Image (tube, rainbow, N blue to C red):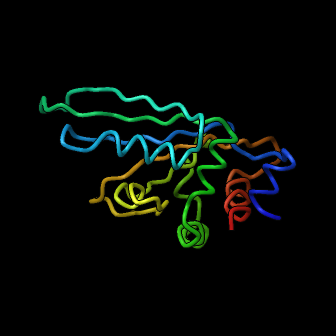
Amino acid sequence: MGGIQEMFRTGEDMSVHRGEWRVHASAVDDIQVIEDSLVWLCGDGVTISTQKEKSTLGAPMYTIYANMTAKQTMFSLGRLEKVSIEGILSSGLESRIDEDKYLHLRIDLAALSRGKGEVTLDKDKMVAKGKFKLEVYPGQSTHGVARSIFEALI
């Protein structure tokens, strides 16, 4: 046993405080499928909330949130496809981490509804947007912490 499974078994520092997935959907999207997909992505016990709103043009829309604990966040990242994780590592993490130590990812929503965690850079696709607060202590590199998370997932 190794990687992420070993982290769960030993309770080893997982390097994230919390995480969230967010989806913006229209009134014609199947909200239940999106919610079910987020439950699959995040695991049992995840908190899913759906807010009905109006778009800037007045059309009804929904924002669906999945808020996760540190353990649920690591489980969720473990659902990412291996090719996506390798792509994240090879493309560099710098552009995915903001000044507040949040890591940002986008998953293709159509793939997610089929049970696949495919990271995408395509701006034209509907996505689930992920935001993960990295646990970084003095003397640690934010990028090094992020890199170690993804390396443990392979």
Instruction: Give the percent coordinates (x, y) of residue 117.
Output: 49, 60
Work out which quarter of the rendered image holds the C terminus and state it: bottom right
| Residue at 59%, 44% in the rendered image | 43
Instruction: Give the percent coordinates (x, y) of residue 22.
Output: 42, 40
Q: Is residue 108 left or right of residue 69?
A: left
Question: Compared with residue 148, is residue 11 higher up or lower down, i.e. above or below?
Answer: above
Work out which quarter of the rendered image holds the N terminus and state it: bottom right
Q: Is residue 12 left or right of residue 99?
A: right
Q: Quadrant of residue 144?
A: bottom right
Q: Nearer the viewer, residue 65 or 1?
A: 1
Question: Compared with residue 17, is residue 76 higher up or lower down, i.e. above or below?
Answer: below
| Residue at 53%, 55% in the rendered image | 96
Q: Is residue 97 left or right of residue 15?
A: left
| Residue at 53%, 68% in the rendered image | 84
Instruction: Give the percent coordinates (x, y) of residue 107.
Output: 44, 56
- All told, the count of numbered labels is 0
Q: Is residue 101 left or right of residue 66?
A: right
Instruction: Give the percent coordinates (x, y) of residue 91.
Output: 54, 70
Q: Nearer the viewer, residue 44 or 13?
A: 44
Q: Quadrant of residue 149?
A: bottom right
